[in-house]
């Protein structure tokens, strides 16, 4: 699945705030080796490099489009290493001090094995810091499923190009990580995004959860699908009297120390 950096960055401010909230809870002062898993266009990777100026920082992503955008915006003298790799298969050599991942790991399945695997890539005392959307029960995501039912062929196609699976609750991650961590911090936050413009919720989901659905629809069906989804979102998220739209969005945060 090809990613569209420009569409993703339309809501850069809304996506940046939870990333900074996660970074603020990382209990490290001077890690030597830092990896940003699912680095996307690299904006957060650069923030990590500024936050930890003595660290060797790597931005890792599976999307060549996102990495191309990251490299295109490189600053003079920048020392960040960019790496294309499959996150699920990635191995750290040598072990690293901080694995930071903002809004990426929900695209991968098998969290019961993935998270212990990532913790194993850390040096002793290293930190795994993760933020993921946990929005699958919200209208923005349930309405995507509702619209898909009108196109029976989507079910088979989506097996090859899946959407993010529902993310487990804090209790699930506690049970997976607590036996392996010296300390574990878990919390959820529901952000209230104030969006502007026409049909802003479909625009928000279009670069993430909605993207594989649109790519698997026949070209002749996309406009019809989007018209139905936009109309449903207007009902679920009606504009306020000032024209803006309130969009609650829940996210889960995990900070585990090896």
Image (cartoon, rainbow, N blue to C red):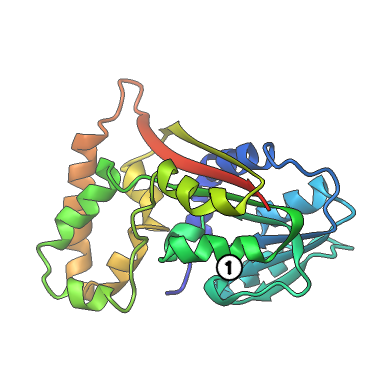
Between 118 and 209, the one lying in front of the other is 118
Residue 64, compared with residue 80, is above or below; it is below
Between 25 and 180, the one lying in front of the other is 180
Question: Would residue 160 appear left or right of 118 to someone viewing this image?
Answer: left
The picture places residue 205, in percent across and down from the top left corner, at 37, 52
Residue 235, compared with residue 30, is above or below; it is above
Q: Residues within 10 Å of mark 1 (few under 14, many from 20)?
A: many
Residue 83, compared with residue 194, is above or below; it is below
Quarter holding residue 169: top left
Question: Would residue 55 appear left or right of 156 to someone viewing this image?
Answer: right
The picture places residue 4, in percent across and down from the top left corner, at 48, 65
User: Residue at the spot x=41%, y=48% of the render?
Assistant: 172
User: Residue at the spot x=34%, y=27% of the render?
Assistant: 243
User: Residue at the spot x=66%, y=75% of the render?
Assistant: 91
Name the residue at the top extreme: 241
User: Residue at the spot x=67%, y=54% of the render?
Assistant: 43
Residue beneath disc 1: 66
Counting the numbered discs, the total is 1
Between 7 and 46, the one lying in front of the other is 46
Quarter holding residue 241: top left
Between 56 and 11, the one lying in front of the other is 56
The picture places residue 114, in percent across and down from the top left corner, at 51, 65
Name the residue at the front extreme: 179
């Amino acid at each position: 699945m090809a990613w569209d950096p420009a569409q993703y960055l339309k809501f850069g401010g809304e996506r940046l705030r939870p990333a900074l909230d996660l970074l603020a809870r990382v209990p490290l002062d001077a890690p030597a080796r830092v990896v940003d898993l699912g680095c996307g266009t690299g904006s957060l990777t650069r923030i990590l490099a500024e936050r930890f100026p003595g660290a060797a920082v790597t931005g890792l992503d599976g999307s060549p489009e996102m990495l191309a955008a990251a490299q295109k915006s490189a600053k003079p003298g920048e020392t960040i290493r960019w790496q294309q790799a499959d996150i699920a298969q990635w191995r750290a050599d040598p072990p690293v001090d901080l694995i930071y991942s903002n809004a990426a790991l929900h695209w991968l399945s098998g969290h019961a094995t993935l998270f212990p695997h990532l913790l194993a890539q850390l040096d002793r005392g290293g930190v795994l810091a993760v933020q993921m959307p946990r929005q699958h029960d919200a209208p923005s995501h349930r309405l995507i499923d509702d619209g898909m039912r009108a196109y029976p062929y989507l079910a088979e196609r989506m097996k090859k190009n899946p959407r993010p699976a529902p993310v487990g609750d804090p209790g699930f991650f506690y049970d997976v990580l607590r036996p392996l961590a010296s300390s574990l911090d878990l919390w959820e936050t529901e952000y209230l995004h104030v969006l502007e413009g026409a049909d802003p919720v479909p625009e928000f989901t279009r670069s993430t959860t909605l993207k594989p659905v649109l790519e698997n629809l026949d070209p002749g069906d996309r406009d019809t699908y989007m018209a139905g989804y936009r109309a449903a979102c207007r009902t679920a998220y009606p504009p306020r009297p000032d024209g803006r739209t309130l969009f609650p969005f829940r996210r889960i945060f995990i900070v585990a120390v090896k």
